[in-house]
Amino acid sequence: MAATSYFSNHSTSKFSALAPTSSSTTTTQPAAPGRSRLPSSKHFSTSVTNGERSKSKDSSENSTAISTPKVHPLRNTWVFWFRQQRSPGNKVIDYEEGIKKISAFSSVESFWSLWTHLAPPSALQPTTDYLLFHSGIRRPVWEDPLNITGGKWIIRLRKGVADRLWEDLVLAVVGDAFDECRSIVPDAESDDGNVQGSAEGGLPEICGCTISVRQSEDIISLWNRVEADKSCRDKIRDTLRRVLNLPPSTIMEYKTNTDSMTDKSSFRNSAIDRTPLS
């Protein structure tokens, strides 16, 4: 299944027109307006007339405008994080200490530029995590103000299948495939009284997603903002099944961030979803 099929209508056109490798193209900025400067190198003629110089400048600017690729903005700014529980010397690292910010992106082009340089999950050492959260999340932890009332859908994977499913999940999250999964609970406000979240003024229900590489399994999880809204939570589950093309036998689990804070674990003691497929 093509990756672009995981996007909502307004996002599909953004990604389908862009090959992953095109992100490496360097964007040339137009020359700054102002007085033109004569070339100083001896390899260039300095006897150009004013008219010829202006014509040459106009031609150069037109050529630059044509060659500069168009940037396709995303609805939200997203941030990739990386966490490793153990240091190279096998010292166990505190959870917060182990989280490192990789980079933020807010356009299709900047996403692919970053994505093509990230190692796939299969290349990571056990007890390593990738975390992708929207920029409203200050830190990708349970206690963050936008995470604390939410939870996460959890899918455990056998080793060897995580690379494709992780890519499909990231594309679905960044491409707003879960946009219709919205909670009826009013949006929260930040400390300064301003509503955080998407450019349209409302908080996205999807906070982010993670992949956790472990010794005997890989675990992907999709975090949502309001765990108390069961109908929204169920819609997220159904959308997740669809975008990842999961077989009916797939076991899905859910755990609130409050429970995670209580037992200090994201994945232990999670509740298995037993809703029959329609």
Image (cartoon, grey):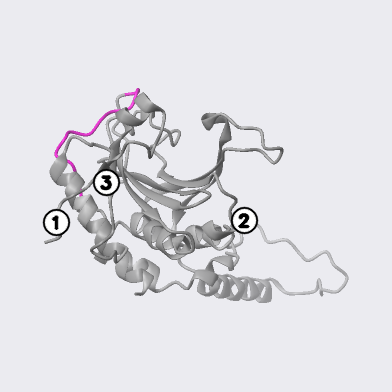
Residue drawn where x is 41% and y is 28% of the image: 264
Q: Is residue 183 above or below residue 145?
A: below
Of the residues under marks 1 and 3, which one precedes in the sequence? 3
Q: Is residue 132 above or below residue 158?
A: above
Residue drawn where x is 34% and y is 28% of the image: 145
Task: State the image coordinates of residue 184 (x, y, percent, origin top left).
Answer: 14, 39
Return the mark for residue 14: none
Mark 3 residue element: loop
The crowding category of the residue bearing disc 1, from other C-alpha atoms within 10 Å (few below 14, some 14 to 19, many at least 20), is few
The magenta stretch spans which residues?
181-192
Q: Is residue 6 above or below residue 149?
A: below
- Residue at the extreme front of the image, as rendered: 216
The residue tagged 3 is 200
Q: State how far apart marks 1 and 3 are (Cα).
A: 35 Å
Of the residues under marks 2 and 3, which one precedes in the sequence? 2
Residue drawn where x is 21% and y is 47% of the image: 273
Q: Are marks 2 and 3 in contact (CB under 8 Å)?
A: no
- Residue at the extreme right of the image, as rendered: 42
- Residue type, label 3: Glu
The residue tagged 1 is 276
The crowding category of the residue bearing disc 2, from other C-alpha atoms within 10 Å (few below 14, some 14 to 19, many at least 20), is few
Q: Is residue 113 left or right of residue 232?
A: right
The answer to whether residue 72 shows anywhere in this view is: no
Q: Quadrant of residue 27?
A: bottom right
- Residue type, label 2: Gly
The crowding category of the residue bearing disc 3, from other C-alpha atoms within 10 Å (few below 14, some 14 to 19, many at least 20), is few
In the rendered image, residue 190 lying in the magenta stretch gets the answer: yes
Q: Are marks 1 and 3 in contact (CB under 8 Å)?
A: no
Q: State how far apart marks 2 and 3 are (Cα).
A: 37 Å
In the rendered image, residue 55 lying in the magenta stretch gets the answer: no
Q: Main secondary structure of the magenta part?
A: loop
